[in-house]
Image (spheres, grey):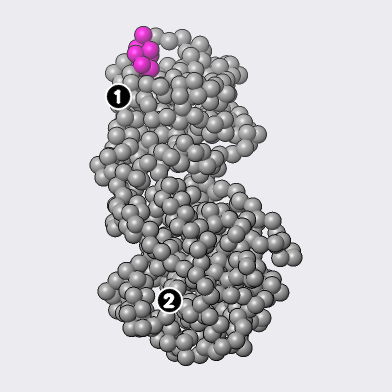
Amino acid sequence: MSGTGEPASGDAPERRPPHGTILFRAPPAPIALGLILLLSATLAAILWAPAARPFEWGFLLSIVGPALVTGVLTTPIARATGGRFEWHRSLFLVISVLVLQLPLAAAWRGAVYLWPATVPPILFLGPFLAGPAFWFRHLSLYGVSRSNHARMLGASLLQPVLFLAGFFAIVAPTTPALVAAGTSLVLAFVCALLVLRASDRPIRREFHSSGVALIRPLLDHVVDRDPQATRTLEEFFLRTTVLATVRVTLLTFLRGDRVHATVALPAVHPGPFAALGASDLPRKLDELLGPGAGTVLVPHTPSDHDLDLPSSAEVARIGTAAVELLHSLPASSGRRASPLVSPYPGSLARAQLLGGIVLVVVTQAPEPTDDISYAVGDRVVREIAREGGPPVVLIDAHNSYVEGQGDVSYGTPLAEKLVTDVKAAVAAAVAGGADGPIEVGVGRKGGFSTGKDGIGPEGIRALVVRAAGKTSAYVLIDGNNLVIGARATILSELLAVVDTAEVMTTDNHVVHEVDGGINPLGERCPPASLAREARAVVERALADLGPSEVRFASKEVPDVKVLGPGYTARLLTSLGDTLSMFAHMFPAALLLLLTSSLVVALLLK
């Protein structure tokens, strides 16, 4: 990680946290094999044990044998036909098919017992079970391995065809039974097409691209950070971007002729997801700035998903602008400074004068606090400048999470209050300023887990400023918001060692790569534990305090591609429609397949 000199004493080596999963993890191979044996034995008992038939041969030939062979061969077959399907997923798919077949076989057996003269004999049960197996395997392989029906047919048919071969080795086939088997497989393919076409339609209609074809790249990006998968997903986002002028701001603290710490503030939202585009922006910008920037903090600026960057290339443009600013910093902005102050009770803004600029942190906590519209932040900064005020560095603390609440939109009463409060906070900071040394210290701790702690790769970082007789601490946690109430717990711990403090999050969307998605801080790691970690980092920053020179620089980058207004809403709506369509079509298609297969069996028996 970037920095000057050695990390503070006791600083854990920072490492990239393990990726989470979008839905779930397939079981390890030993557990998967155990489940295959158990499910196969149960299905064999349902098929063969009630009758005077060779249970052992039925178990080996028609169920567990085909299941194990399928588990082994699906991966190389998929690879040979241009797809990709890992071993653990192959075994899990075999298990899923057996789970699907079990209740169907049990229902058939029960119906035979109740209505023996009506229900087709066991000769037709094999064809009846093969159809759903093919249907489910083709849906899975088409979505996860490769979106090509012809290339995936071989791998999709493997388990049901082997099952039928073993089944008919025990129960001698008749022409009607073979016709029923072929018809069942054809019906399964048609029903799979119905589900896939219906599920694909919302995203294809809105974005002119196959949503199903994005499943495999998404898995590869999340699990392996596969470069080709990342490019495929970013190309999808790039198709409907708009151009924007993006402001990049640096607030730096020098010791001697070296930058000791940098607060990097691009007007960019750290989304959309995982490490795509501007997601994981704090780590990306830290790496782009390099060791010459000292300890880098990338707080959340006033921005929302309209300012998500769609690609790594656009992130690189922002990084290049930041590096240019770092290498052309203007002279010191002065020695006048204030503590971190609030103008009055209930203010949304707290401000600190640092040389010739004012650092402002905005939060609605303990009320919900989320994204502040860029237009709101830009308006207040421009109005203060027009009124003769100092340059303002504005941070959205993003530190009190309640789902669907806390956004500050332009033109609302809340936005008007924010503008008023920021102006008052800036005035209070300027009035409270005093000439004297400005001491700055930094601390950091990494090595956290996204899945266990909800903290991204930049970990916890602290900037402590001692000025005008007071010590102020800024703690930045690389995560997506704090559960409501956690801010107060953390601040209570910090105020034992400093005079004033604020805790902020980066809103890094990389932490969404876990079960449940949003992953706010305090949900996985208790707030009390976060408070202790934050205090330890602040104590390192206090030990690092030293006289520093404040410098400030800003520039605008034109024609940056961003997702633009409404993109996220369109995408989420399309995804919601896709899930809704799939949720309805999946059982409907399965019911259609079972009903039509049963009708065929009744006609042919």
Q: Position of residue 601 (x, y in %)?
A: 33, 20
Residue type of the residue flagged with mark 1: Val
In the figure, is residue 281 to the left or right of 373? Answer: right
- Whether 210 is drawn above or below 333: the answer is above
Q: Categorize mark 1 by other alpha carbons within 10 Å: few (<14), some (14-19), many (20+).
A: few
Nearer to me, 329 or 317: 329
In the figure, is residue 416 to the left or right of 257? Answer: left
Q: Residue furthest right?
A: 9
Q: Earlier in the sequence, mark 1 or mark 2?
A: 2
Nearer to me, 553 or 467: 553
Cβ atoms under marks 1 and 2 closer than 8 Å: no
- Give the magenta part as a residue range: 175-182
The residue at which mark 2 appears reads as: 392
> Could you say whether the residue bearing mark 2 is in a helix, strand or loop?
strand
Q: Does the magenta portion include 212?
A: no
Q: Residue at x 49, y 17 (%)?
A: 162
Q: Position of residue 152 (x, y in %)?
A: 42, 24
* Quadrant where the N terminus is found in the figure: bottom right
The residue at which mark 1 appears reads as: 599
On the question of residue 175 being in view, the answer is yes
Q: Position of residue 52 (x, y in %)?
A: 54, 17
Nearer to me, 350 or 330: 330
- Whether 149 is drawn above or below 428: the answer is above
Q: Residue at x 31, y 38 (%)?
A: 209
Residue type of the residue flagged with mark 2: Val
